[in-house]
Image (tube, grey):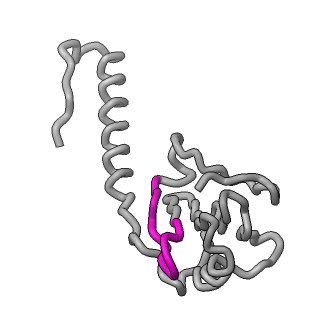
Amino acid sequence: MTYESTSAGSDPNSRCLEFQRNSAAVVEKTRQAWITRPAEQLPLDAKITVTIGFAALTRSGRVIFEENDDAGTRSMTVAEAEKLAQRAPEHEWCIHLVGQGQERHYKRVGEAHWKLYKWGAGLRHPDSRSLPRRRTSGELLQC
């Protein structure tokens, strides 16, 4: 690995700033390498759950199912979500899996076909717009 060097290398403040920039660059490069693109399709036997974070099924932006460990509810499978979606195919159906290290968002694009349309770094990344808070029953979630 090569490090950037400034002309004022003997100045302690310049060296400190240079170290901080190089450290930040290494951390960002490592973080990007760890985020691997998830599978394009969500299998029907997959569960709509995350360890820490937010997992939900939405219909036209409204939360239909939300994982809630506090309430002791069991997790829903994609096959169960598909059964609901088959009853109202005219709506836009999405599954949102937002965890600490990664977030994945899938959209139903056909019968038994849930396609990845958005993914990212999850709740740890400062630019993440995904919120770990619970949503109210009537609140819209952008799909």
Using the image as rendered, state which of residue 142 and residue 1 is in the foreground.
142
Residue 110 placed where, x, y %? 49, 75
Q: Is residue 50 magenta?
A: no
Relative to 22, say whether 85 is above or below. below
Residue 2 placed where, x, y %? 16, 38
* Left or right: 79, with 31 as reference point: right
Q: How many marks?
A: 0
Image quadrant occupied by the C terminus:
bottom right
Most extreme residue toward the front is: 90
Image quadrant occupied by the N terminus:
top left
Give the quadrant of residue 85: bottom right
Relative to 54, say whether 69 is above or below. below
Using the image as rendered, state which of residue 131 and residue 139 is in the foreground.
139
Give the quadrant of residue 46: bottom right
Q: Is residue 110 magenta?
A: yes
Query: Residue at left 75%, top 72%?
Result: 69
Using the image as rendered, state which of residue 6 and residue 61 is in the foreground.
61
* Left or right: 127, with 11 as reference point: right
Residue 43 placed where, x, y %? 48, 81
Principal secondary structure, stretch drawn in magenta:
strand
Give the quadrant of residue 90: bottom right
Using the image as rendered, state which of residue 85 and residue 135 is in the foreground.
85
Residue 113 placed where, x, y %? 48, 77
Query: Residue at left 67%, top 54%?
Result: 141
Residues in magenta, as a range:
107-120
Relative to 109, say whether 18 is above or below. above
Query: Residue at left 32%, top 38%?
Result: 25
Query: Residue at left 38%, top 51%?
Result: 31
